Image (cartoon, grey):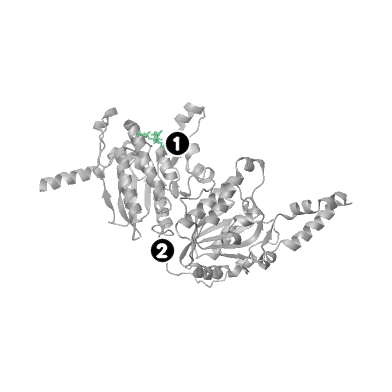
Amino acid sequence: MTHYLQTLREMRERAMQGGGSERIAQQHSRGKMTARERLALLLDEDTFQELGALATHNITDFGMDKNRVPGDGVVTGFGKINGRRVAVFAQDFTFVGGSFSEVQSHKICRIQDVALESGIPIIGLNDSGGARIQEGFRSLAAYGEVFVRNVLSSGVIPQISVMLGPCAGGSVYSPALTDFVIMARGISYMFITGPDVIKAVTGEEVSFGDLGGTLVHNSKSGVAHILAESDQESIELVKLLLSYLPQNNTEDPPQVARYDSPDRMEESLNTIVPEDENEPYDMHHVIEAIVDHGSFFEVHPYYARNAIVGFARLDGYSVGVVGNQPAHLAGVLDIDSSDKIARFVRICDAFNIPIITFVDTPGYLPGLDQEHYGIIRHGAKVIYAYCEATVPKISIVTRKAIGGAYIAMSSRQMRCDLAFAWPTAQIAVMGADGAVRILRKRELATADDPVALERKFVEEYREKFFNPYIAANVGQIDEVIEPRETRPRLIRALEVLRTKVKQNPPKKHGLMPV
Ligand code: HXC
């Protein structure tokens, strides 16, 4: 018996060493932790149950018969985060660059299956150069098995991808199918092909960072949703993110004990919107003043900054917050902000998280580029996502709600449960200048002083239509409230809506414009 135990212990010990001490030292010298160190930081102490620790590949080409380690470059299993069950995998760059093999696929798919059937979140710590080239087609095909499970799990269990190394090829497509992508500054890169291939194909010369670094994907491509400063911080952010999410789509997110008075009136909000309608203010300040102190966790903060999305708590309950940002491009809705909002609304709806929408937008952005790149198609996603969502939805118009963007941003007519407006709200079909030029075209054409007349007409139009009361009179706004009352109003409304039941007609799936 001791002999058998001895063999098992030796094999396990070998698995612990990954690609060996030299490679581990190299990993550390790059400011990166090993797969096992990352999991130790992620999971509650002594909760990790590893599976497939001893699995090895059986490839012999390219000298791989002499290059085998137990685990084959990925650590997989189950554990707990703050007492809640999760499935995890962590790729081990110290063995063949964490490259994705057939064995890796079997191991990852195994925990994907159990996670889906048990209804628990799955977190992937990615550090991989993509399909293991020595395995040829086998490793490539194996990605398909992972992708199909990503898609079947989508909207059922939260899937979080943390990018912790140079990830290429298939190693970026699986994360792209998941709900949240976190990148760590200076160590994470994502691209479908690296700089060398790009140079060969297009002749372009580009560095790793400029091609697929953290800033590129967090601010430009929108592929990444959260930026961490380090390996360690990205792990902490996973824990924080999970605290707002349910285990699966049949459960509600966890509630935290009340620590901020539900009746708190925030006096500063009564003066936060400037008198001058063209003067910006920061919607972050509005959100932060209303939600439970310190609970706002912004998602996608560097991408399409004219919109704000993120999670927060109201009286201890998770909510999703969407806002236009008047401090950036006047809060206009463009292609990127439409994508950002639509995606976030659908995540909230999938995971039973009520959506609070703060509206201050002059409308969809006019312009040739926007039209040619498809603002109609992308803008329609916002409408689709809000119309489709059955979770409780509450909107607050703080200032401008003009034109199509008023309807799109969770309007009363689009199954929004409660629509509030501040007295500073301007709810109108279009901007005053544009409206006057159309409605008063003839009078302006024959006027002695068209400029002065236009100014007068604009003033009249604004006086008459730029307020919340016409919309409130016809029931498009449920109540005009003092800004300082917003927190208690929202908390009471959510209490009522907590038992809301709403269903969409049965269908295979909708055809959201993509
Ligand atoms: C086999 C790989 C590998 C891979 C890295 N390695 N990627 N081995 N298959 N895909 C090995 C290296 O040979 C090296 O081994 C070790 O891992 C560390 O890699 P380095 O290159 O030394 O590290 P670094 O300089 O940090 O560069 C990392 C890298 C680079 C950017 C990931 O290795 C790279 O460009 N790899 C190829 C990336 C790629 O094109 N993947 C696409 C695969 S096709 P030794 O023993 O020499 O130290 C694919 C298609 C799927 O994934 C499509 C699905 C839709």
Residue at (50% x, 33% y) in the render: 206
Q: Is residue 368 rendered to the left or right of residue 294?
A: right
Per the rendering, the mark at residue 254 is: 2
Residue 455 lies in what quarter of the image? bottom right
What SS does tag 2 mark?
Answer: loop
Per the rendering, the mark at residue 111 is: none
Front position in the image: 60 or 476: 476
Q: Taking the image as drawn, is residue 204 in sight?
A: yes
Among numbered discs 2 and 1, the one appearing first in the sequence? 1
Q: Is mark 1 within 8 Å of ligand 1?
A: yes
Q: Is residue 143 rendered to the left or right of residue 326?
A: left
Q: Is mark 2 within 8 Å of ligand 1?
A: no
Residues at marks 2 and 1, CA–CA distance in whole angstroms: 37 Å
Q: Residues within 10 Å of mark 2 (few under 14, many from 20)?
A: some
- Ligand number 1: quarter of image: top left
Percent position of residue 447, x then y? 88, 52
Q: Residues within 10 Å of mark 1 (few under 14, many from 20)?
A: some
Residue 480 lies in what quarter of the image? bottom right
Per the rendering, the mark at residue 192 is: 1
Percent position of residue 336, x then y? 57, 46
Q: Is residue 243 above or below residue 53?
A: below
